[in-house]
Amino acid sequence: MTIDVLTLFPEMIEQALSHSIPARAQKAGLVDIRAHQLRSWAIDRHGTVDDTPYGGGPGMVMRVDVAHAALSAIDHTHRAHRIMLSPDGDQLDQGLVKELSQKKKLILLCGRYEGFDARIEKYIDQKVSIGPYVLSGGELPALVIIDALTRLIPGVLGNQESLKDETFEDNLSDYPQFTRPEKYRGMTVPEVLLSGHHAEITKWRRSQRQEI
C-alpha cells in the first residue's frame, strides 16, 4: 500500500509516523507513506497556497489550482483513491477503515484555514471525517486514518489473531484485560482467568463483550 499525504506541515506526519506500528509497517516495506509539502505546487515564489474568500468573510481559503496541481503530480493516472479530510465527510468507523485498507494507493488531502475552495471536490473521490467537531487542520485526521488502517495490513502486527477480538470487530467491545499484580488495593483478577481452563476463559471473555 502507498499513502501520500498532502499537507502544509509534512513534519507533523513524518514525526508521528516514525513510532510504533506505522513505523514498523514502513520498515518492513508493507506500506510506503510519504508526506508532501503543498507549497511545492504554489503559484508564486512566496509559496502562496491560499487567498481571501469571494463574497467576503473571515479567514483564508486554500486555492483549488494549488491542490489540483499537487493531486495531478502525485497521481497523474488517477489510480489512487483521493480523500479530503473534512468535518462534513463520511464518518470514519471500523467498516470504513477496512474498506480503505483494501486500497493499493491512497492520497490524503489535508486542509487548513477555512478549508479548500469547494471546486476541489471535482478532483477527489471521498471526504472523510473523524468526528463531528472542527480541528485546526487535516493532519490529525490523516494520522488517525493511517494508524487505524496500517494495523489491518497482513504482517504488520506481530500476532494477526489479536485483531479478531478487538473493539468494534463484529460490533462488539473488547473484553476486559488483566495482568500482574493479581491483587491490587482490594481488587482481584477474575478467578476464571487464573484457572487455566481455556474453554471457560473463552466463554467468560465472550460474555464480557458488549454490543456497540
Image (tube, rainbow, N blue to C red):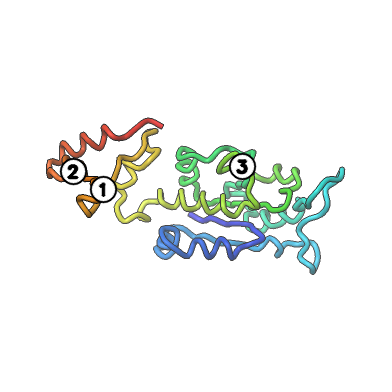
Q: Which residue is mark 2?
A: 193
Sequence-earlier tag: 3 or 2: 3
Sequence-earlier tag: 1 or 2: 1
**The image quarter in which residue 94 lies:** top left
Q: Would you call the spot at circle 3 few (<14 residues within 10 Å), some (14-19), or many (20 or more)?
A: few
**The image quarter in which residue 90 lies:** top right
Label 1 – label 3 distance at C-alpha: 34 Å
Q: Residue at the location (37% across, 38% down)?
A: 169
Considering the numbered disc 3 on the image, is that residue within a helix, a strand or a loop? loop
Q: The residue under label 1 is which amino acid type?
A: Phe
Q: Residue at the location (25% across, 37% down)?
A: 205
Left/right placement of residue 192 relative to residue 9 reads left
Q: The residue under label 3 is which amino acid type?
A: Tyr
* Residue 178 - label: 1
Considering the numbered disc 2 on the image, is that residue within a helix, a strand or a loop? helix
The number of numbered badges drawn on the structure is 3
Q: Residue at the location (47% across, 53% down)?
A: 147
Sequence-earlier tag: 1 or 3: 3
Residue 77: image x %, image y %?
62, 52
Residue 190: image x %, image y %?
20, 41
Q: The residue under label 2 is which amino acid type?
A: Leu
Q: Which residue is mark 3?
A: 133
Against 123, residue 71 (above or below) is: below
Q: Are marks 1 and 2 in contact (CB under 8 Å)?
A: yes
In this view of the protein, can residue 125 be seen by the observer? no
Residue 93: image x %, image y %?
49, 39
